[in-house]
Amino acid sequence: MKTLMSLNQIKAPIAEELKTFEGVFEEELRSQVSLLDTIMRFVVKRKGKQVRPLFIFLSAKICGEIGEMSYHAASLIEMLHTASLIHDDVVDDSMQRRGFFSLNALWGNKVAVLIGDYMLAKGLLLSLKNEAYNLLQISSNAIKEMSEGELLQIEKARRLDIKEEVYYEIIRKKTASLIAAACALGAASVGATEEEVERMHLLGEKIGIAFQIRDDLFDFGDGDAGKPQGNDIQEKKMTLPLIHALNTTDKKTRNYMVNIIKNENTNPKKIQEVTDFVLQSPGIAYTRQKMYDYQEEAIALIRAFPASEARDALEGLVRFVTERKK
């Protein structure tokens, strides 16, 4: 297996652009409303690895010369991503985000929802202000897909009748759509051809699916994601290891496990029983292979672009997000 690049090595070809972006993004979030400005500073200080801006700038550099529109695209994707996380924390009643108190824990659900709405509107208005209608179309479609994915997951969680193809449709919409948008936005921001933008979108989709599959494995103790083992089972999320385990067992065992997930998902001992069932099944090995399949498909798409330092870094980023330990 190829040695993983560090995040600093991945960032190297676009280090100056990322440094500039931090100032641009902070300036975009400034407000004359005191409470809003305080919360925006809180948001900026607690930003994560900023993986999506990385995809934006690397995709842009592969397809052309990074310019002002690329910074607008990166700001847009960070605003949309942050808005979705804020709303997720409200929906999931989460009190923490990345090891800190969540926004809703500190300011309450009402303020959190309004801040999420504000950031969504701010991002879309940024595109209009710069007459970047192609960026607006790509990002608006991602928002629609994310909402559809969340609702499809909720619908299927109620019935627990999810098939593997439905699982892929959920994660394609819910998780992969925003990463696909980031890659496409990067290409579009430097005037790439329609074919290049489409290829970047497909690349981002493959990466996003592999990323979510990796997240599924965390729930069964594969790495340190900072979330309790069995958390997905407790929330009745039908992840790929569980789906495959259920599909490869006998009917009696399947019905027994589904009943636990439906009716006893708050009982730690019962959750552990389902977790052990999955760990003893072919589900983990099957899921890990699927993750690598999508990773390799993404890398093949990257290698269709001309060789460059940015292309190598993007390939490194693909490996980083799918083989991460947390």
Image (cartoon, grey):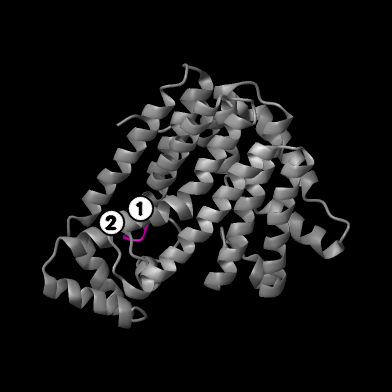
The residue wearing badge 1 is: 168
Q: Answer yes or no: do the residues labelled 2 and 1 have beta carbons within 8 Å?
A: yes
Numbered badge on residue 130 = none
The residue wearing badge 2 is: 164
Could you say whether the residue bearing mark 1 is in a helix, strand or loop? Answer: helix
**What's under tag 1, amino acid-wise?**
Tyr
Describe residue 231's horizontal placement relative to residue 50 as left or right: left
Camera-nearest residue between 269 and 313: 313
Q: Which residue appears at 30% of the width and 74% of the height?
A: 271
Classify the position of the N terminus by image quarter.
Answer: top left
Q: Where residue 132 appears, x then y in whole percent?
A: 71, 37
Q: Where residue 148 appears, x then y in whole percent?
A: 49, 60
Q: Tell me the quarter of the picture where residue 256 sits.
A: bottom left
Regarding residue 94, the answer to whether it shows in the image is no
The Cα atoms of the two marked residues, 2 and 1, are separated by 6 Å
Crowding around mark 1 (Cα neighbors within 10 Å: few <14, some 14 to 19, many 20+) is some
Note whether 106 is above or below 123 in the view shown: below
Give the residue at the far top of this rendering: 307
Q: Which residue appears at 33% of the width and 60% of the height?
A: 239
Camera-nearest residue between 241 and 251: 251
Crowding around mark 2 (Cα neighbors within 10 Å: few <14, some 14 to 19, many 20+) is some
Boundaries of the magenta span: 218-222
Q: Which residue appears at 71% of the width and 26% of the height?
A: 67
Q: Is residue 208 magenta?
A: no
Regarding residue 209, the answer to whether it shows in the image is yes
Q: Where residue 22 appears, x then y in whole percent?
A: 71, 40
Q: Which residue appears at 22% of the width and 58% of the height?
A: 244
